[in-house]
Image: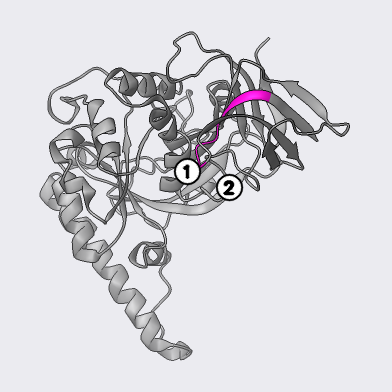
Amino acid sequence: MYVIQNGTLCTMDGQGVIQADLRVDHGKIIEIGSDLPVNGAEVIDAMGKFVTPGFVDAHSHVGGIAESGQADLNEITNPLTPELDAYYGINPQDDIFQTVIQQGITTSCVAPGSANVVCGWVIAYKSAGQHRLVKRPVALKAAMGINPKGCYAPKNQAPMTRMAIANILRTYLRNVQQYRQKKLEAGDDMAKMPPYDLGLEHGIPVIEKKIPLKVHSYMHDMMTLLEIAEEFDILVTVDHAQGASDFLEELRSPQVHGVIFGPTCEPIFPGEGGKLDYECCKALDDEGVRVAVMTDGPVTTVNMLLFEMGECVRRGMDPVRALAMVTSNAAEIVGISDRVGSLAVGKDADILIWSKMPTVATDAILERVIIDGETVYRQD
């Protein structure tokens, strides 16, 4: 047990930003308040420092796409692979996890790659600890636009066009609906039960709105995605989302579970990469749309979250609201806010201690990273 004393706590919940102590025991936050008694606990002095929840990276491929080129999270063999599961593509000993820890990322939403129109289940996974799987599944991954087109057009195979992508996605969702209905009608009569199909099984939680469809999509595909989401009455997250500033009103749809913007470390290029509109994050947040930012690591660099939050602040976003994009908002979008994303009694003790407010101070130093109550990184 230990007590973090005298820090400025960015709780990311109803308490806001407060001066308080925080007590941790058995991997959980058990008390927050002023002048907490030590009672023999280890003391961490956070005087003059900022204490935040651990960062939640809302879109990542860490542990499954290695710098060596091995890509166990991107099955580029069939445009429809909903039966896959990111859980089986992660190497928990990948050195990338130590790198993301040093960026303050304590939990990553790890998804299959975007080669296919429907790609497989997505999971939430901690960067360290004895019990790293937070939730499985948190979403079903899908992709529109340049990635599926770029993977299958050279093979002279559908989808070569956006027309085909929309049709493949609609057909899959319709098949899931029909499969689910047959199961419901069969009840306990196994003779009437349809043949078991894991790919369709993975889509049932989407149709039932238990998890969202997590869709790689840019400005070219947003209206198509929203049309399909409304047609099937499902929840979606709009991932990458460059160009979202052109569709602010439309993205207020109740079908949109969240917008996950980024990554922003690539050069602007014609077409889908032709617009980099950080300002959409503030505008979406002002509209009441859940918004987060991402690394997409290690496809792109894993140190992007601080830069992305800072750019949003530079464009007028409140610094605490910017912090929400990698804490409370990200956790809500991923569906794990019962455990992470805020500093609150009962939550996992995933905690960062900073020398200064990280969304404002460009020289803020991450001094300590705590996951499940254990210090996994200290700045020497």
Q: Which mark is residue 238?
A: none
Picture layout, residue 114 above or below residue 254: above
Horizontal and vertical percent position of residue 21: 69, 30
The disc labelled 1 sits on which kind of residue?
A: Ala
Horizontal and vertical percent position of residue 338: 55, 51
Q: Which residue is drawn at 25% across and 64% down?
A: 233
Asked if residue 145 lies left or right of residue 52, the reply is left
Name the residue carrying label 2: 339
Which quadrant of the rendered structure holds the C terminus?
A: top right
Q: Which residue is drawn at 73% across and 37% down?
A: 24
Asked if residue 131 lies left or right of residue 273, the reply is right
Which residue is at the front of the view, 5 or 234?
Answer: 5
Horizontal and vertical percent position of residue 302: 45, 23
Marks 2 and 1 close (CB-CB < 8 Å): yes
Sequence-first disc among 2 and 1: 1
Residue 158 visible to an observer of this rendering: no
Asked if residue 114 lies left or right of residue 217, the reply is right
Which quadrant of the rendered structure holds the N terminus?
A: top right
Which residue is at the front of the view, 245 or 22?
Answer: 22
| Inter-mark Cα distance, 2 to 1 | 8 Å
Which residue is at the front of the view, 190 or 61?
Answer: 61
Asked if residue 90 lies left or right of residue 222, the reply is right
Residue 6 visible to an observer of this rendering: yes
Q: Give the range drawn in magenta.
A: 6-14
Secondary structure beneath disc 1?
helix
Name the residue carrying label 1: 331
The disc labelled 2 sits on which kind of residue?
A: Arg
Picture layout, residue 199 above or below residue 2: below
Q: Which residue is drawn at 30% across and 17% down?
A: 314
